[in-house]
Image (cartoon, coloured by chain):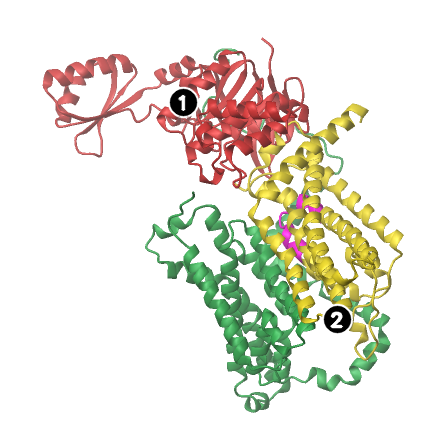
Amino acid sequence: MTNVIEARDLSKWYGNILGLNEISLDIGPGITGLLGPNGAGKSTFMKLITGLLKPSRGRISVLGGSPWNNPVLFSRLGFCPEIDSFYEDITGLEFLLGMIRLHGFPAAAARSKAMAALETVELAADRDRKIKGYSRGMRQRLKLAQTIIHDPEVYILDEPLTGLDPLGKRKMIKLIRSLGGSGKTILVSSHVLPEIEALTSLIVLIHQGKILARGHIHYIRDLIEKHPHQISVICDRPRHLAADFVGDANVSRISFGPSAGEVVFETGNRDQFYDRLGKSLVEKGIEVEEISSPDDNLQAVFEYLTGK
Amino acid sequence: MTKSSVGDWYRAAGRVFRFYFFLARRAVRTRLFVILGLVPVALAVIVRVVFAGKSGEVMAVFNDILITFFLQFYIVVLSLFYGTSICAEEIENKTLHYIATRPVSRSSVIAGKSAAYILLQTVMVITGLTVSYLIMNAPSLKTGGFFPLLLRSYAALFLGTAAYTAVYAFLGTVLKRSLIIGLIFGFGWENVIQYFPGSTQKLSVVHYLKSLLPYRPVAGGKLSFLLFRLEPTSPLASIATLIIVTAFFTVLACLVFSWKEYRFDE
Amino acid sequence: MDVGTEVREKGYTGWEGRLIQRRFKWSPIARTGIQLAFRKKRFKPLFAISFLPAFFFLVGIYVAERLEDFRAFFREANSFIAVDPGFFRAYYSNGSIILFILLVLAFAGSGLIADDLKNNSLQLYFSRPLRKKDYILGKLAVPAFFVSLLTFVPGLLFIIFKLIFSGSFRFITEYPWLPLAVVGQSVLYIGFFGLYTLSLSAASRNSRYVMVLVVLVYFFSEILSGILKLIFRSPYTGLFSLGGNLNQITAVFFSQKTPYAFSPVWSFLVLSILAVAGFIFLFRKIRGVEVIK
């Protein structure tokens, strides 16, 4: 597989603060998820890939060339930034026309591409509205439109689902997956695990500027599986419920939480535990108010991986 | 740079020019600046009405005032705002990533944007000056006696706009607070330096602009040293200097913008 | 991509890159030391002040070039450096003070409301127990602070140092109303420039544009007044000049001859109308909810 994006010993300092710490990574065609909490270095990495920042040390290569001061590259690369900012006094259509004309397309072709991009992101009806009148979700869709308009080979999407409603997210996920399926190279960043899960199975976990883990999503899940999970149940008879699980080999710990009626179980085998939980609740006629998993999230994975 | 890459650069600059000329035309602030440039037109109408049929001295002085208004105020304000905006507004409005991730080189962005803003300013300036001049000199339209001065004014204003825009564009690429430095330069330095003796005057853009236009010497007296004193440079040297200043600072701005990393305050 | 080839285990991981050799090994130390010096609070003004001797010597070079002119100037030294109400008036009417006030306000005041409009922060303010009056007063306090540093504080210091250097209270017994005049003058500048800055800041979401407006509007009024004077040759053209109106009232405060041959009441009226109009504009612009069509 030819690598489209190659990073070797890539480091970036902001003054005395280390933003990226010796990143070496290869990204090929398909969708790769870049996962990390806020401040992990995702945006820094993406800005290095898109030539908005220069590496302090190491090198980055995109489609065989350095992205810094390499305008030719940008006819083959599309970037959807995280920041919500536009030229506010023009319409969505005018903005896209401006962007596509910068690629050198003649007027007629530019207009047709702009309209197609607007149709794809479902903004065609609002094309003649000024951008300052757009809602948050519309602005996000417009950002995506300017990314896809010139049909690049490489897409760098920094938190592309931010600000979208659930239906909008679904549609966007579908679009991104279709682009990935057609052989494009897509790097998507997010701090929300389920969003990345819905897009791809290839993940790079980044934290404090370093790559913590990379691989298929089920590998990350395995890490979570090995780490005991916490499940919180709020019900009317927590001690009765707890008593039922004391002898269960899958449960390593039981404690009572701060909320009234809360009991917290720790288990190494979530699937079997949930199976047993459902049966126990029905048999004993326990009224359940809430079942939640406090640590089934990215934060827990990171805490585990970083030892906090 | 090969021939084709030079051609590509110009084409890229042309695309940038077209986009930003369109954007600047549509901006609300452009309308205010246009209105400002039309104030002399209103004043010219008032002068013509009030002094209809009277002596020509006020007319002549008002012609000078017109030039002073455009030369020492209007183009300074316009180029200060538009020149510093070339780089600074992309940073402040956080829109840099849109233009920086298009297949146009960073230097062509500066060149294209500068050209767009210079053209827009020139149109605004020349429109206001031409209309007010025509109103002021309506009786002598047939003889066209004022045309040479008008053409010299066009040249001075165009060169002044270009030079100031280039200087402010460079300031905008280098400094975070380019506008405040620009204000100090435009309304402080450019005014004060004219009172300095000898060759110190040549360290200002306005000196060369005034050298291109007719000059009325100021009478002496006790406080003569406080009054404006022009020791003009030859017109040819002034034009060459203004062109060199424009080219030099534009190239510098291109180089800085190509080399420097810009980060948004997040 | 390899599966599971890289997992960073728990704990701190530092930078593992390769150190490079510097040609001048002392340069990072020097650079850091200089940066640290500038980070100290009082260093920047001290550093700026330390250039004063050089500046004065530079002025000396200029004076040396124009020695004859300055000799003539100092023949009338008595009338120039007499510290009386005229001295105070000269300070407050000085063009450079106005210019510095404008520059400071352009820098510190242009974004006061413009940035709030741009970032839709007004909703955040008014979701707290704040009224428009509180918001405006809070914002007004910013230009008021800076203008008072340039007007009230120097005026007060001039009086105090005059008393100290003269070694007697004769000055204050001769002009007992002077401190009140300084206060009045400062209130005039604070009120006018405060509302001037805020209303311009409310006029646009672009603080850069406002910065230019703060200086532009003032200077434009001066130019307009000059042009109208040339046309109409009437002292009332001074009413078009913001600086002219301010100077007219300043002269009254310090019992000096007014620069224009019309009643200062007209200047007061003009400034009051502008201040009220500015305030009304400001009040209407500040809204908790913005509707964009």
- What segment carries the magenta color? B168-183
Verify whether residue B41 appears in magenta.
Answer: no
Q: Which chain is green?
A: C
Query: Can you say whether B26 is above or below C163 in the image?
Result: above
Query: Can you say whether C289 is above or below B194 in the image?
Result: above
Chain at tag 2 = B
Query: Can you say whether B4 is above or below C65 in the image?
Result: above
**Which residue position holds label 1?**
A195
Residue type, mark 2 in image:
Val
Foreground residue among B148 and B98: B148
Query: Can you say whether A155 is above or below C53 in the image?
Result: above
Q: Which chain is red?
A: A
Magenta stretch, main secondary structure, is helix
For the question of whether residue B203 can be seen, the reply is no
Q: Which chain is yellow?
A: B
Tell me which residue sits at (69%, 48%) in the image: B123
Foreground residue among A265 and A214: A214
Point out which mark residue B58 bears: 2
Q: Residues within 10 Å of mark 1 (few under 14, many from 20)?
A: some
